[in-house]
Amino acid sequence: MADITAFPTIYQVVSQGHHNARDVIAGATIKAGQVVAYARTGVSNTVHPAVKGTTGGLAGVAAYDMASGDKGTIYTNGAICYLANADDGTALDAGDLLEHNDNAVGGTVSAVVAAATTAAGQALYNDIIGYALDDIAGGATGRVMIQMQTSRQTQG
């Protein structure tokens, strides 16, 4: 189990939900299908490939390749997009909640791990990008329903 070392080429980013899109500014080189997050650099509406613990809040999924400074399109809540599994040895199951990962290639996803548990036994999850619609093999891509949430609490 190790992080993938290069972001795969994703030729078809969106499966459904083309209308769930908006414009952003690329603050770095971005590849089609990368999960993007706000830059935390003091500039408005600027995104980078998401890297957990480094970038800010999640913004969406890049519709196509963008160079730094380009104005481009990202898909947001309600779109079904093909995303890349961050780990080449761990599969994701359909229905898994997914989050952005700390993989250095940026823009990848992994299964959500509970951040903490409340006294009432409720699990707290942070930075959810959505949930897997397909089983996604390690290092592969698969369809994900984009349903971004900054946190989610389950019943205890």
Image (tube, rainbow, N blue to C red):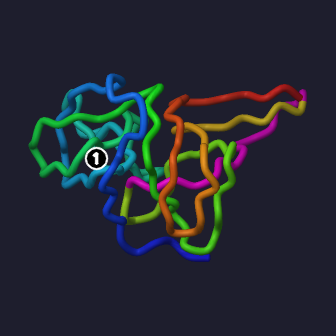
55 up-or-down from 86: above or below = above
Which structural element holds mark 1? strand
- Relative placement, left or right, of 67 versus 103 is left
Who's the residue at 69% across and 43% down the image? 95
7 up-or-down from 94: above or below = below
Who's the residue at 27% across and 41% down the image? 63
Horizontal and vertical percent position of residue 130: 56, 37
Which of 114/85 is in front? 85
Q: Would residue 154 be counted in the magenta stretch?
A: no
Q: How many marks?
A: 1
Horizontal and vertical percent position of residue 110: 58, 55
| Quadrant housing the N terminus | bottom right
Which of 133/1 is in front? 133
- Relative placement, left or right, of 53 versus 37 is right
Extreme left residue here? 69
Horizontal and vertical percent position of residue 90: 64, 68
| Amino acid type assigned to the residue bearing label 1 in the image | His
- Relative placement, left or right, of 24 versus 58 is left
Horizontal and vertical percent position of residue 73: 23, 34
| Quadrant housing the C terminus | top right
Who's the residue at 88% across and 30% down the image? 119
Q: Give the main secondary structure, helix, strand or loop, of the magenta stretch.
A: loop
Q: Report the span colored magenta.
A: 107-120
Specify the quadrant of the image occupied by residue 71: top left
Which of 102/99 is in front? 99
Neighbor class of circle 1 (other Cα within 10 Å; few <14, some 14-19, many 20+) is: many
52 up-or-down from 56: above or below = below
Who's the residue at 39% across and 53% down the image? 107
Q: Which residue is mark 1?
A: 48
Which of 84/143 is in front? 143
